[in-house]
Image (cartoon, rainbow, N blue to C red):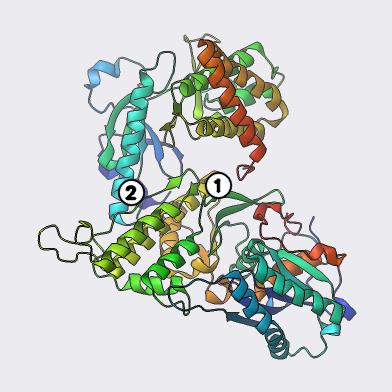
Amino acid sequence: MSEQLVAQISEYLTPNVPIQLVSQGAEAVVFTTNVHPYLPKESYSGVEDAKFIIKYRPSKSYRHPSIDKSLTKRRTLGEARLLGKLHQIEGLHVPHLIACDAYNGCLWLEFLGENLPNGMGFSNLKNFLWMYAKGGNDPYDPIVLETLYKVGQEIGLLHWNDYCHGDLTSSNIILVREKPGSDTWVPHLIDFGLGSISNMVEDKGVDLYVLERAILSTHSSYAEKYNECLMNGFSSVYENNGKLGQKKLKEVINRFQEVRLRGRKRSMIG
Amino acid sequence: MVNLNAVPPKNGRDYYIAIGLEGSANKLGVGIIKHPLLNKHDDGDYSHDCQVEILSNIRDTYVTPPGEGFLPRDTARHHRNWCVRLIKKALEEAKIIHPTLDIDVICFTKGPGMGAPLHSVVIAARTCSLLWNVPLVGVNHCVGHIEMGREITKAKNPVVLYVSGGNTQVIAYSEKRYRIFGETLDIAIGNCLDRFARTLKIPNEPSPGYNIEQLAKQCSNKENLVELPYTVKGMDLSMSGILAYIDSLAKDLFKENKKNKILFDKESGEQKVTVEDLCYSLQENLFAMLVEITERAMAHVNSDQVLIVGGVGCNVRLQEMMAQMCIDRSNSKVHATDSRFCIDNGVMIAQAGLLQYRMNDVVKDLSETVVTQKFRTDEVFVDWRE
């Protein structure tokens, strides 16, 4: 990341907000901070290591300023609205939206997850599965299978409510312990930058296909069982909704298989 | 382990010579190249550094009158008319007197492209092969572009943006294939520009896209961009809607339809937008989309090199925007070539074909030389890279 970009962000956030880089995507840069945007410090300073996520869409100097402005605004606002709506769905877990400055392309979000034991990295699904695949652990541990089932449920719930994620990968799913110290994990979906409201079967099918490919390319040896668990969780949400659910599930699954056969450009590894 | 020297050059020479025939669209190109036999190619990933010497690079473009595109039938006739003359001229320029002795391999475009023009050229290739008794190699047009770009710029493993009249793809190499990470869902960018040029009735000489670029440079009102749809979908993009919209604007402009509030002032009826402004807005909008999907692919594969190939790749504004993105992203440089290698040519077919030949991938029977209009980039097994 170039220094100019860092300067741009620091200037916007002012020196009162110390930031630490987490990741740089194509479109947005993600930081953590320990400052809340509007609550007084006393209200959360009691909580140990209060942490918040800042997702910042820097302005891109290569494109025309007016294109840049409208895109930044539209996308930030779109993501914020989507998060707001998803938060109201019962049983679905997404990060809590704290603040949104659409004109400057900045989102403040709740910090989720923790560091996995034994230096296995951050508690997203990818690292979690790797942790169980390595070093004497059982890759088909009941905890793993249960977690995957729950991930499937989250996605099922998302689709059942006619929302699509657009970029489902195992690193875009964060696991949070139900209670500190417990071994039950609650999956949270993050990064709705490509998300949308859609009742089209095609979008849902593509969503599932993208996830399947992601699992296949990052956890190839156990992918079959993992995907089965995910799909079981996914189906359970639809099946709980009676006849209509059954019908819709069939449509989604059929389209999913069609997309898979098409295989098109998404046959990429990397 | 890649051994590019598996097939020795003909007659104990210390170099290879290949002739490439290209005619997948309205350009007919014949190119002759020479690869020296280098020890480092015995083992290692050096396919981007063949120290190619270009002996001749001749091209003839079928140009149509303003407002018209090129039809397959007429283009094929043009290619048939010129093919022999161009091959003769290329041989003369390369000072090759006995093709039978001097040429190692004849490379032709197998696809993708327009059927009729491809057919005309492959017939010439087969004839030469039988006449001179030289083996044939069928080349994927897109891979030709990529290999030529890599050879000229010496970029080892770049993310490739391939933009031309028929293709718009973002490509990266992975496990013996050039994989397509993003592409257009409907029409190609060059097609979009060409068709807009047709609406504007601007000349097709030297190329419609070039003329749009020149008009865009003359835009005097760069602050007020005409707003156009911005249609990036993940790593893919769509351009037909943009074309339909800007076409309708241009038509209103020519008809002086004062009801159009985007083009004419609400009260005075004065014209606010010129043809130059439209060209500028179209370019800015389309190229911003291209750069964005390229950046996405770069983030995906963790690469910091970009190579732009294809006819639209000559556009200076596109190169500028890409360069700016590379600086912002990782202080890297963008790799681009000029019109000699960006626009379809025979040399690139010879380059990719010769690499294929050196890996011993030649046509064994004439039935394998059937051309195809649909030939995806990721169908080619890239033998010559690690």
Give SS at disc 2: loop
Residue in the foreground of this view, choosing between A65 and B380: B380
Circle 1 SS class? loop
Say which residue label 2 marks. Answer: A59
The part of the image, by quadrant, that contains residue B109 is bottom right
Q: State which chain disc 1 sits on.
A: B
Residue A56 as seen in the image, left or right of residue B348: left
User: Residue B359: in sight, yes or no?
Assistant: no
User: Which quadrant of the rendered structure holds the C terminus of chain B?
Assistant: bottom right
- Figure quadrant of residue B124: bottom right
Query: Is A173 displayed left or right of A109 in the figure?
Result: right
Residue underneath mark 1: B302
Q: Residue at point 76% right, 57% down?
A: B383
| Dot 2 amino acid type | Ser
Question: At 33% across and 15% down in the image, what residue appears?
Answer: A47
Amino acid bearing label 1: Asn
Judge by depth and name the residue closer to the eye, A18 or A233.
Answer: A233
Residue B353's spot in the image, x, y percent? Answer: 74, 68
- Residue closer to the observer: A238 or B72: B72
Q: Is residue A132 left or right of residue A76?
A: right
Q: Residue at x 39, y 75 (%)?
A: B202
Q: Are marks 1 and 2 on the same chain?
A: no
Q: Chain of mark 2?
A: A
* Side of B264 relative to A190 (left or right): left
Q: CA distance from mark 1 to mark 2?
A: 21 Å
The residue positioned 43% from the left and 73% from the top of the image is: B67
Vertical position of residue B236 compared to residue B33: above or below: above
- Residue B16 horizontal/vertical position (percent): 79, 76
Image coordinates of residue B320 in percent, x first then y, are: 41, 65
